[in-house]
Amino acid sequence: MASDSLRFYGLIYVALVVLATLKVVFERQFDYWIAVGGILVFASIKTLLIVGYFQHLRWERRSLSGLMALALALFVLLMVAASFSVT
């Protein structure tokens, strides 16, 4: 059982390393806006993997996951509001 868990977390770690490498490749090889879009997608996937598996939110109650989603939505809303206030 422990070796299965170790293998699973090892695969998640390898996926994170691959995604980090892809972010660097996109930054160096593609046009600015394509690179920004790709990096944002890869960063979002990395965030979901870290939060879901290394912080164990995947196995928590849905109400806690909903609370985290609400906090993220409010954070994004504040960042959008702050971007409009900067002149």
Image: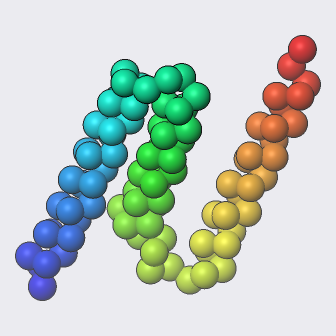
Relative to 48, is 67 above or below?
A: below
17 relative to 78 in the view: left or right? left
Relative to 43, is 48 above or below?
A: below
Relative to 59, is 20 above or below?
A: above
Q: Report the number of discs.
A: 0
The color scheme shown is rainbow
Residue that sits furthest to the top in the current view: 87
- Between residues 71 and 26, which one lies in front from this camera angle? 26
Residue sitting at x 87%, y 36%:
81
> Quick check: can you spot residue 55?
no
Residue sitting at x 51%, y 47%:
41
Looking at the picture, how far across and down is residue 19, in whole percent? 33, 45
- Between residues 29 and 80, which one lies in front from this camera angle? 29
Looking at the picture, how far across and down is residue 51, in whole percent? 46, 60
Residue sitting at x 18%, y 75%:
5
43 relative to 15 in the view: left or right? right
> Quick check: can you spot residue 15?
yes
32 relative to 10 in the view: left or right? right
Looking at the picture, how far across and down is residue 53, in whole percent? 37, 66
**Quarter location, residue 21:** top left
Q: Quadrant of the C terminus?
A: top right
- Between residues 67 and 8, which one lies in front from this camera angle? 8
Residue that sits furthest to the left in the current view: 3
Residue sitting at x 78%, y 52%:
74
Q: Quadrant of the N terminus?
A: bottom left
Looking at the picture, how far across and down is residue 52, in whole percent? 44, 66
